[in-house]
Image (tube, grey):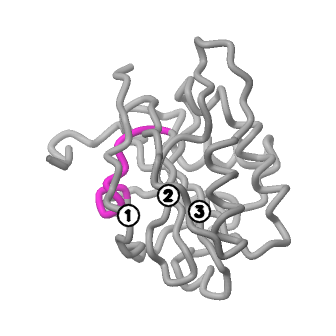
Amino acid sequence: MVLTASTMLQLGTKAPDFHLSEVVSGETISLTNFANKKALLVMFICQHCPFVKHIQKELAQLGQDYFNSNLGIVAISANDAENYPNDAPESLKVMATELGFKFPFCYDETQATAKAYTAACTPDFFLFDSENKLVYRGQLDDSRPSNNKPVTGADLRAAIEAVLADQPVSSEQKPSVGCNIKWKAGNEPNYH
């Protein structure tokens, strides 16, 4: 496991479009699925990472809490399933079902979507406004698997609430940290 921080993509960046298969339904998901939403949360997660496991119940709770709101949520896993079979679509489907995800969970087999978003770690969060402009990229909260702080979702929830209330999101944003995305051999991005 390599501890990796979010790339902190520049605020104001437009959400890159994607067309990915949802692991439970098989439906193709893209930005158009969220066109009527005031905000969109794109989360890069996976099944095996201890940092994701640490917060997975809060991610499911986010989906519950915002299910009938103006927030669209999509989770994406881009890990190399050949070398990390726990992150293959079948395992992701089990994860989504067991946790009761109320949002689509997609698999990025080519890893092109992860690269377009400059996703670097799991978990990695990107929140966009109604114009699909990035307003938040950073951590869920201060909790980590080893620091005994409670998982609250405070940082991400504050950003979501600000966007939904048409308020500015604080520019003080701490990077998310977690396991590095498991890139396929020869597919590693150079974000620098």
Q: Earlier in the sequence, mark 3 or mark 1?
A: 1
- Residue at point 69%, 66% (across, down): 25
Q: Of residues 150 and 83, which is closer to you in this image?
A: 150
Q: Secondary structure at mark 1?
A: loop
Q: Secondary structure at mark 2?
A: strand
Q: Are marks 1 and 2 in contact (CB under 8 Å)?
A: yes
Q: Residue 63 placed where, x, y %? A: 77, 56
The residue that label 3 is drawn on is 41
The residue that label 1 is drawn on is 11
Q: Of residues 6 and 97, which is closer to you in this image?
A: 6
Q: Quadrant of residue 72?
A: bottom right
- Residue at point 35%, 30% (across, down): 4
Q: CA distance from mark 1 to mark 2?
A: 7 Å
The residue that label 2 is drawn on is 136
Report the amino acid beneath label 2.
Answer: Tyr
Q: Would you place residue 33 above or below residue 162 in this image?
A: below
Q: Quadrant of residue 10?
A: bottom left
Mark 1 packing: few (<14 Cα in 10 Å), some, or many (20+)?
some
Q: Residue 61 placed where, x, y %? A: 81, 47
Q: Which residues are magenta?
A: 114-122
Report the amino acid beneath label 3.
Answer: Leu
Q: Would you place residue 108 above or below residue 164 in this image?
A: above
Question: Is 5 left or right of 163, judged from the image as shown?
Answer: left
Which-is-in-front pick, marks 3 and 1? 1
Q: Quadrant of residue 120?
A: top left
Q: CA distance from mark 2 to mark 3?
A: 9 Å
Q: Is residue 34 magenta?
A: no
Question: Is 123 left or right of 39, judged from the image as shown?
Answer: left
Q: Would you place residue 39 above or below residue 58 in this image?
A: below
Question: Is 105 left or right of 49, judged from the image as shown?
Answer: right
